[in-house]
Image: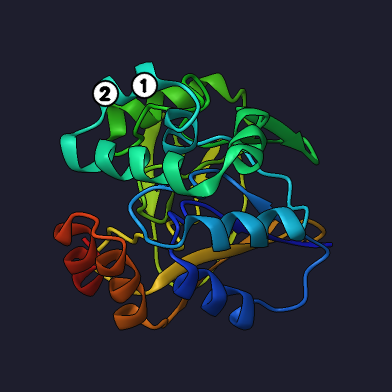
């Protein structure tokens, strides 16, 4: 059984479209949240995800669209995009976002947007935060997104390890596995990032794919969203 793991689409239709073309045949696709935010095509991305009936978790940008108090935690530009998204997507799509769960378990693997101890908001970027969350897994595996940086945090003799390259890894717990971001990569590579989980072989393959960055930038500018969200796509930052 093979499962595509996607996260942080962020209303980038051009990146999502490229991932759909690039993905090998899979039995299921799971989305770890943040379908909206930053990008200029929230309706198209939401409609694609719902049409394909992918099991999807709520991300912090998704939650902000249905809980105004969350906007207090966002910078002004990100909050502006959320407010614009609320205006354009319509009540039906907002209702779908409101129903999204913050965690799920598939084949004994925990799925969250951010981290095992804080499903929506915590960033796992350093060894201290990774260690605290790895201890909660009790030897298990967790797929998460949120940081937009692909990689695997693990433990070896009590020391946190962090690995990433475009390759296939054997999954050995405890491990925090981040497929990276489809629509807003932040590891210095301006290519859409996602992964393929081979359940039977207990492995995970990181995949990168080029997409029409100029098209994604045009969508952001057409919507008159903050220019920096268009520019950052060029550098993957």
The reply, left or right, for residue 162 in relation to residue 43 is: left
Figure colour scheme? rainbow
At x 60%, y 82%, the residue is: 22
Secondary element type, mark 1: helix
Q: Is residue 41 visible?
A: yes
At x 53%, y 79%, the residue is: 18
Q: Is residue 190 visible?
A: no
Residue 35: x, y in percent?
Answer: 52, 50
The count of marks equals: 2
Q: Are marks 2 and 1 in contact (CB under 8 Å)?
A: yes
At x 26%, y 40%, the residue is: 80
For residue 111, what is the image quadrant? Answer: top right
Vertical placement of 118 versus 141: above or below?
Answer: above
Residue 70, numbered circle = 1
The reply, left or right, for residue 32 in relation to residue 81 is: right
Vertical placement of 237 versus 104: above or below?
Answer: below
Residue 183: x, y in percent?
Answer: 41, 62
Camera-nearest residue between 47 and 55 = 47
Residue 213: x, y in percent?
Answer: 32, 79
Secondary element type, mark 2: helix
At x 75%, y 59%, the residue is: 51
Residue indicated by mark 2: 73
For residue 86, what is the image quadrant? Answer: top left
């Amino acid at each position: 059984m093979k499962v595509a793991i996607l996260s942080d689409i962020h209303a980038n239709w051009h990146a999502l479209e490229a991932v759909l073309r690039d993905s090998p045949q899979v039995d299921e696709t799971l989305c770890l949240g943040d379908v909206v935010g930053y990008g200029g095509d929230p309706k198209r991305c939401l409609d694609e995800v719902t049409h394909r009936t992918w099991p999807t978790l709520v991300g912090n940008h998704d939650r902000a669209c249905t809980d105004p108090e969350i906007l207090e935690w966002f910078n002004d530009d990100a909050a502006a995009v959320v407010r614009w998204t609320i205006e354009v997507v319509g009540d039906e799509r907002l209702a779908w976002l409101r129903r999204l769960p913050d965690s799920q378990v598939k084949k004994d693997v925990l799925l969250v947007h951010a981290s095992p101890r804080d499903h929506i908001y915590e960033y796992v970027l350093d060894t201290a935060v990774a260690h605290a969350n790895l201890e909660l897994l009790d030897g298990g595996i967790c797929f998460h997104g949120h940081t937009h940086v692909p990689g695997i945090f693990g433990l070896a003799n009590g020391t946190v390890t962090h690995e990433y390259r475009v390759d296939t890894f054997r999954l050995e717990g405890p491990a925090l596995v981040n497929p990276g971001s489809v629509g807003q990569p932040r590891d210095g590579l301006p290519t859409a990032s996602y992964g393929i989980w081979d359940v039977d072989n207990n492995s995970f393959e990181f995949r990168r794919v080029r997409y029409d960055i100029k098209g994604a930038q045009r969508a952001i500018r057409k919507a008159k969203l903050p220019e920096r969200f268009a520019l950052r796509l060029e550098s993957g930052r």
